[in-house]
Image (cartoon, helix red, strand yellow):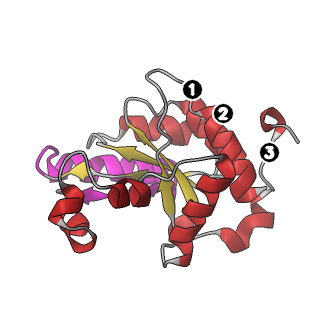
Amino acid sequence: MTSANYKAPESSERTADRAPAGLGRFGVWATSWTAKPELAVAAERLGYGAIWLGSADGELRPVEELLDATSTITVATGIVNIWANPAGTVAEAWHRVEKAHPGRLLLGVGVGHREVIDAYYTDTDLTAPGSDRLVDDLIPHGTAGEVAAKLRAHLKAGADHVAIQLLTGEDADPLPGLTSLAEQLFG
């Protein structure tokens, strides 16, 4: 099967591989500026369970665009910053989106995550440009099969969902890489 023709199994066939909250085991991370409806449609077709939007705006308009274009994928915000978005605005937006797309929005609200990094890595690891251990742990690299094995290792270590941020050149299409990974992860 070639990458261009790969299609994930029907959702009923992969039910056992679903994580809590309809996220699936693997999701795609993008920014609110780079996540286009075409990416969400392709990710859903390939079998990814979620699209994660970094730095999501509290109005949730990009979230709505992705949900409008798809039928099953969950859109998760990672994060809507509490210091930049009034609570009332976020609440109104959540209700609007939830009414139109019940159960398909996971609203992540927060302030940051330095404390999580500090729990696993030393100051030496975090000193620019970052230790080899830090880079190898956080940025799986290699062939699609090697990257898929490293992503599955996160699940074996206790994660119930892994968001994948595919690093590409500027303006490069992430779909070929996401397709190759999907073949390894779901195929």
Residue type marked 3: Lys
Q: Are marks 2 and 3 in contact (CB under 8 Å)?
A: no
| x, y percent for residue 177 | 62, 38
| Along the viewing direction, whichever of 64 and 47 lies nearer the viewer | 47
Crowd tier of the residue under label 3, counting other residues whose Cα lies within 10 Å: few below 14, some 14–19, many 20 or above:
some
> In this figure, what is the number of numbered marks?
3
Question: Tag 1 or tag 3, which sits nearer the N-term?
Answer: 3
Report the mark closest to the observer, 2 or 3. 2
User: Is 142 part of what is drawn in magenta?
Assistant: no
Does 176 sit left or right of 154 as displayed? right
| Residue 20 visible, this angle | no
User: Is 104 part of what is drawn in magenta?
Assistant: yes
Quadrant (top left/top right/bottom left/bottom right) for the N terminus: top right
Question: Which numbered circle lies on residue 7?
Answer: 3
Residue, disc 1? 173
Instruction: Estimate the spatial distance between the alpha carbons at disc 1 and disc 2, rounded to whole Å.
Output: 7 Å
Q: Are marks 1 and 2 in contact (CB under 8 Å)?
A: yes
Residue, disc 2? 176
- The quadrant where residue 61 appears: top left
Crowd tier of the residue under label 1, counting other residues whose Cα lies within 10 Å: few below 14, some 14–19, many 20 or above:
few
At mark 3, the secondary structure is loop
Residue type marked 1: Asp
- The quadrant where residue 136 appears: bottom left
| Along the viewing direction, whichever of 98 and 40 lies nearer the viewer | 40
Work out whether 171 lies above or below 107: above
Query: In the rendered structure, which segment of residues is drawn in magenta?
Result: 83-110
Residue type marked 2: Pro
